Amino acid sequence: MRNKIIQFTVISLFMMITTMCAQNVIVHADAQFAASELYVHLKKICNQEYSIVAEKEFAGDKPAFYVGQTAFAKKQGIDFASFAPEEWLYCTKGGNIILTGHELNGAEYAVWHFLENELGVRWFTFESTYIPKKEKLAFGELNKRGKPAFLERQIYSASWRHGLEKKLLTQNIEFERRNRFNERWSPVRLSKQANHCHSFYDYVSPDKYFKEHPEYFSMNKEGKRHCGKGRAFSQLCLSNPEVAQVAIKHLREFIAKDRSTLPKEKWPIMYDISQLDCTDDICQCPECRKIIDAEGGDSALVVLFVNRVAEAIADEYPEILLRTFAYVSTEKAPKTYRPAKNVVIRWCDVYTRSDCFRPLTSKFNDRQRALVDGWRKLDAHLALWDYWNMDIDGPYFTPPRVETMVDAIAPDMKYFRSAGFDMIFIEGETYQFRNPQNFYDLQYWMGTHLMEDPDLDPELLIADFVEKHYGPAAPKMREALEMLRKAVREDTEPMYYVIRSLRQYQTASFVNKFYGILKEARALTPEGSDYRYRVEKELLTPMAVMMATQGFVSAERRKELLEEYKTYRTARMDKYAAPDKRPELDKALQLDLDKYGFEVELPEQFKKYSTDQIRLLAYPHFASTEPDADSVTGRAMVSPPEGANTKHVMKLQAGNLKPSWFGAYDYPSKRSVQLNLNDFPQDEKYHWYRIGKFEIGKRSIVWGFFWRMEVKLDQFWTPADGAPEYNTWTVWISAKLTGPAYVKDSKKENRIFLDQVILVKE
């Protein structure tokens, strides 16, 4: 009897599997997109014909995939009302497979999870999809259900500016959606009547109100009302109750417009009303100042203002939320002011203060974690704007660095969930056609999955990505990744993203070794294969580091690297770039080739020093430059636009400085040396000036024009191992001053130019 039962069970299981292998119909109920996603991938996996049919047209005479909120699923006892937004389910019923969920994204998520979990499909990047081949499809009993950990999930990579071919931009959107990013399909519908951030002026416009009501806008420390420009450089006077009334008026107009022009199911439930950018305070008027002093910071002003607006609409529109920033001067929670229940605090983990390479739970981020705890104590409804190792124009990834933050992602997502954040936005720009952050694609893909489920094993995610994305190069790519992870892990200093570009591990030997491993990986890939392009992408940044950093390579080796670097970048553009973007991308490449191939002859007065006694910095090492025919380098750093307290007038101004003064400074130790340049040559040409002897530290700079011109010296600091004056150099600058502020009867514009910095061992 026992043998008969076993035999019957085996036969039944065999019949179930073979029946399931016979499925070739995809039945859907108002889920055409989800059904087509299943169809496209099944066709690629298994050499079998499939058809898509609406449920009302299906006879039900054969096993099928049932996609969406089908009548068949309902008959099997599935309660659609029990699903939360984006919750999904797939399961077997007889010889059928049900893929369903909430009406918002549920069916799509069920399909994508089914393809990933049961069939091994992966969407790694816009150009890297892994689809295994199978002769037959066979499944056992299936019953999996889940929902994302966060309501909103987005990593902003700025794909629109990549210069990708149009079809690849479309593929990038598909890649993001298949990995469950939901900015465009979020259950939290955000109004487009106001900007998605920095939106104060959408509610109280200076164009409309400043002339008649300057008191609605910020007062600076000198007691003057101002309104900046665009979405930056000023704020509103948030203690003024009239400002809140104006904002309420326009918010009601926004709501009315949304509800008159959109179907009810698309009515926004969130309106952003957040502070502007590029300021370090809100308002310095006496009334605002009183609140700031009592509450311990500017955030009290924001909470006061947004609460006034929120409370005015709470009864009439109980479903609507107002989202505001806790950002820069408002990141610290107030002492007693509590955000209203319909207010969302979007806390920003500001990149100048946070070590994104280590988790927020690490010792390097104690300060940031304490800020989150402050808002949690107020029972604030929290959303997050986080920052990864961004690459945007300016000082962000200049100079380039070899680094990775893969080990911060998983613990951060667990922390964000435990801290009560329910919306996650990460700013993490990259470029496809210049020096990318190393293993950025891995970071991004891990982020997509850990945002959805923070309990996933990051090591399994890493192994999966490296094996399938790099193919035959995987062992060497894993070796390079582990080398970099170990270096980041063992760096004993905080790795703040912008203000500390120095990496202790980024020595010439380290970067050369890292580069060598990647070259070995490249050699394992077939010529012209996608695997080779992916490895070459990782090679670009270490090559840029070697060429950009003095002493890392010889002049002859630099020339070889330039050719190799040009070859890899050109190959990527040939393969992926849009034709109309090519001139712009070629120009950017040539600028980088000029920069990394740059060499300038030492001035005569410095030729007496040996190569180990002198270091030279010029435009390749400056964050920003302009063309200048007078400079031997052809470019120079130039004084920025004048401000209220930074004018080209030879008198003491901001910081008790004059515009022509220069200096060197180290942030951690506060060591400094200053050149008070008061007498100038009248020829408006470059001259060399000695700032003085200075001990370089881990965050040292040369500064000019009220500290608004800045050249980093970090790369020249070296662990001294107790050697006295090992990091001490004499600092020289090559500068030019033009205009009547400095040269009598000059017809030129008042400007200060800096084109070279030289350090010598005297």
Image (cartoon, rainbow, N blue to C red):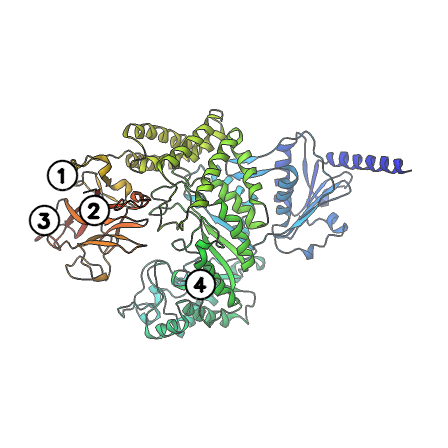
- Give 106 or 761, whichever is nearer the viewer: 761
Mark 3 or 1: the one toward you? 1
For the residue labelled by badge 3, is the local secondary structure a helix, a strand or a loop? loop
First of labels 2, 3 by sequence position = 3
For the residue labelled by badge 2, is the local secondary structure a helix, a strand or a loop? strand
Q: Name the residue under label 2.
A: 731
First of labels 4, 1 by sequence position = 4
- In this orientation, does residue 583 appear? no
**Residue at x 79%, y 37% (from the top left corner):** 13
Height in image: 387 above or below 116? below
Side of 695 relative to 567 (left or right): left
Side of 219 relative to 246 (left or right): left
Side of 416 relative to 45 (left or right): left
**Contact between labelled residues 2 and 1, with CB atoms less than 8 Å apart:** no
**Contact between labelled residues 3 and 2, with CB atoms less than 8 Å apart:** no
Mark 4 or 2: the one toward you? 2
Q: Position of residue 569 (x, y in %)?
A: 39, 33
Is disc 3 surrounded by few (<14), some (14 to 19) or many (20+) residues within 10 Å?
A: few
Mark 4 or 1: the one toward you? 1
First of labels 1, 2 by sequence position = 1
Disc 3 to disc 1, how far (Cα)? 18 Å
- Identity of the amino acid at label 3? Pro
- Identity of the amino acid at label 4? Ile
Q: Mark 4 points at which residue?
A: 273
**Contact between labelled residues 1 and 3, with CB atoms less than 8 Å apart:** no
For the residue labelled by badge 4, is the local secondary structure a helix, a strand or a loop? loop
- Identity of the amino acid at label 2? Val
Q: Mark 3 points at which residue?
A: 681
Disc 1 to disc 2, how far (Cα)? 14 Å
Q: Mark 1 points at which residue?
A: 605
- In this orientation, does residue 631 appear? yes
